[in-house]
Amino acid sequence: MDIIAKIISFWVETFIFYYSVAIFSAYFILAVVSGLVLRRYFLNAKIADHNEVLASPFAPSITILAPAYNEALNIVENVKALLALHYTNFEVVVINDGSRDETLAKAIEAFDLEKVPFVIDERIFCSEIRAIYKSRKRALSNLVVVDKVNGGKADALNAGLNVAKGQYFIAIDADSIIDPHALQKMVKPFLEESDKKVIAAGGVIRIANSCEIVDGHLVNVKLPDKLIPLFQVLEYNRAFLLGRLAWSKLNGLLIISGALGLFDKEIVIACGGYHRYTVGEDMELVVRLRRYMTDNNEKYRIEYIPDPLCWTEAPGNLNILVRQRNRWTRGTIETLFSHWSIFLNPKYGIMGMVAHPYWVLFEWLAPIVELFGIIYFAAISLLGFPNWSYFFLTLSFVYFFSISFTCYAILYDHIAFYRYRSWKMVFKQLGAALVEPFLFHPLIVYAAIKGNFDYFVMRNRSWGNMPRVGLTNKNSTQTNK
């Protein structure tokens, strides 16, 4: 019996060891690639003039789609910020997705909206559109508010696409705050000459909790006061600066955040728009776009702008955080399985041979492997033959790699963007990095495991309720006092 136990223990520990080496090697490679790309980006940015897009008569038209469901806390300030973006040819389409709060009423009052006659060219199916509102004010002629029956975020975006007039569209969350120069920077790759067509572009998302906001504009960047949003600052830094930037360079990017993404409208419509029956519509759309272009033998690129172009409210309590990450997990599983034909398929190049397998092995399965490891060590401890030296060696390796990876992201962010300007804020992040693996990471693992359970066992396909606390907004009159 002891021999069998030792054999099983050997193989389990060998698997855990090589799995850990593989995942950390992948992280290291992505970090190195991201560092090189970020350095080149900022060297080019020194000579780039984004204002030339403003001056150009050929600046393409852009529609900003902002789905809103129960966003009464932030809707007025955020729409004001969208209308103030630095771009010559754009419209803002707010889609009220059957909100049960005062989202629509506040928008009508703030922007002097009235119902207008409308005819919809329904190129993509969506739930019933009840009314379309436009402002009586001439200065707000580029604002359109769509009121529709609730159908979820993907359905709301499809309704917006049916109304949109722009050549390109940008999909954002209604609670997001966009950098005033975001459109200039994101549209630039679409205008550059290349043998590959740019079909989409994404940007860096940052956490706005505790930041100072005036009239919908972020005027003072601060770190969150609470631990949960603070940990998410670290998490977003790793994901966007050391992950997605590298995947974009490797032509394997599978996701553009739903909080900020610019797309070629006609190609999205040709693909059928957003999938209405998924909770991960942002990732699913990007994968479907890439499949569509490959299947039609079209050369294409998906770009990624490493500038922090969007700030959003992060969950501030455990329940909302777990629900959000549960949904992210279920959305990832849906996308990976609905596009399983990509897996190790050389037809799809880097996406099929590297990116999709990476997401399967290291994004979807990582929490499951981690839970398996915890159960394994707990079981052998109870049975009386634990390998404590191996356990503490593995734990130390994982811990020190984790904090080193996070510290690298913090320092690179400070050097490159200098958004958290005081060293006090930098040291606050470094301090949070030391305890994150023990306080925050277990919550993320729990949410991912629950997401797997809900997907495979409970068959849960719902979006779930994500209530907002609301960002702290001040108006200019209050600020001047």
Image: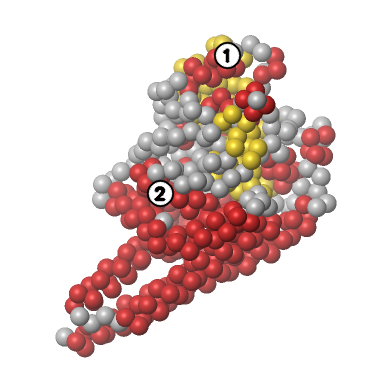
Element at badge 2?
helix
Image quarter where the N terminus lies is bottom left
Q: Is residue 369 left or right of residue 60?
A: left
- From where the camera sits, is residue 261 visible? no
Q: Earlier in the sequence, mark 1 or mark 2?
A: 1
Q: Is residue 321 left or right of residue 210?
A: left
User: How packed is label 2: few (under 14 Cα within 10 Å), some, or many (20 or more)?
Assistant: many
Residue identified by numbered label 1 = 113
Q: Is residue 99 left or right of residue 271?
A: left
Q: Is residue 424 above or below residue 279?
A: below
Q: Is residue 157 above or below residue 291?
A: above
The picture places residue 9, in percent across and down from the top left corner, at: 28, 81
Count the marks. 2
Question: Observer-nearest residue: 349 or 405?
Answer: 405
Q: Amino acid at mark 1?
A: Leu
- Which residue is painted at 63% across and 67% down in the image? 32
- Which residue is painted at 73% across and 33% down in the image? 86
Q: Amino acid at mark 2?
A: Arg
Asked which colour scheme the image uses, the reply is secondary structure
- Which residue is painted at 78% across and 58% down in the image? 43
Q: Quadrant of residue 252?
A: bottom right
Element at badge 1?
strand
User: How packed is label 1: few (under 14 Cα within 10 Å), some, or many (20 or more)?
Assistant: many
The picture places residue 139, in percent across and down from the top left corner, at: 70, 17
The picture places residue 284, in percent across and down from the top left corner, at: 48, 46
- From where the camera sits, is residue 192 visible? yes
